[in-house]
Amino acid sequence: MFFIILAFIAVVLLLAIVLPSRYSVVRSVEINKQEEGVYARVADLSRWKEWDPWFRPDTKEPNVIQGAAGEEGQTRNRGEAKVSIIDVLENEKLLFDRQLISPVRLHSLDSVAFEKTAIGTLVTWTSKADLDYPLGRIYGLFNKSARAKRMEASLAALKEISESETDQPPKPVSVPAPNIPE
């Protein structure tokens, strides 16, 4: 039995050597809205609960948001995961630092770019991660495809909620004329 366990560990360690040490996932969606509105929804981590399934409310692990919306340093902590805005190019690009502590340590840099198109905005989400040997590489084997599916679901929800929002101008406020004696 001892040799079987030892052989299994050796196979896992050898497999991890040949697995990639990093991954990159890129997903895009075109949204029929101007980039300012879409950007505002992504730049504020407290609004991610509207469109990103990872941020939906959970009674066991609440989302804790710190910092000003859309600015470098805004963070979201939830259990063993943390997301921070680390660079901002307003209405064009956001850079995020994502850290996962458990089940394995995983650190990724995500960027979300906003490009004006003929019908609205092309949103491109890129996630890149370096994978530690051996567990990070094994986890990355499964995480890459799961990450791609989650990014696709998030972008589809972002598109749906952004396009369902009406772009009506604010109603004019009627202010009574001052009563000035003649």
Image (spheres, rainbow, N blue to C red):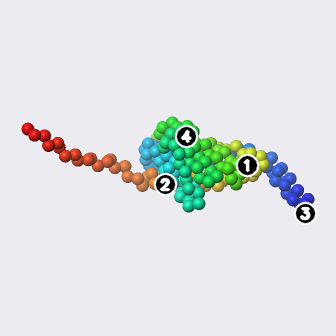
Viewer-closest of 14 and 5 = 5
Q: Which amino acid does label 1 sit on?
A: Gly
Name the residue furthest left.
182
* Of the image marks 4 and 2, the number of the one nearer the N terminus: 2
Viewer-closest of 167 and 105 = 105
Q: What residue type is labelled 3?
A: Met
Query: Between marks 1 and 4, how big is the CA–CA gap?
Result: 26 Å
Q: In this view, does 36 lie to the left or right of 182?
A: right
Query: Between marks 4 and 2, how big is the CA–CA gap?
Result: 21 Å
Element on which disc 1 rests: helix
Element on which disc 3 rests: loop
Query: Between marks 2 and 1, how big is the CA–CA gap?
Result: 30 Å
Local crowd at mark 2 within 10 Å, few (<14), some, or many (≥20)? some
Q: What residue type is labelled 4?
A: Gly
* Residue occupying the point 74% across, 45% down: 132
* Of the image marks 2 and 3, the number of the one nearer the N terminus: 3
* Residue occupying the point 51% across, 54% down: 49
Q: Where is residue 63 in the image (x, y as percent from the top left)?
A: 55, 53
Q: Mark 4 points at which residue?
A: 73
Image disc number at residue 1: 3
Q: Where is residue 166 in the image (x, y as percent from the top left)?
A: 38, 52
* Of the image marks 3 and 1, the number of the one nearer the N terminus: 3
Query: Between marks 2 and 3, how big is the CA–CA gap?
Result: 51 Å
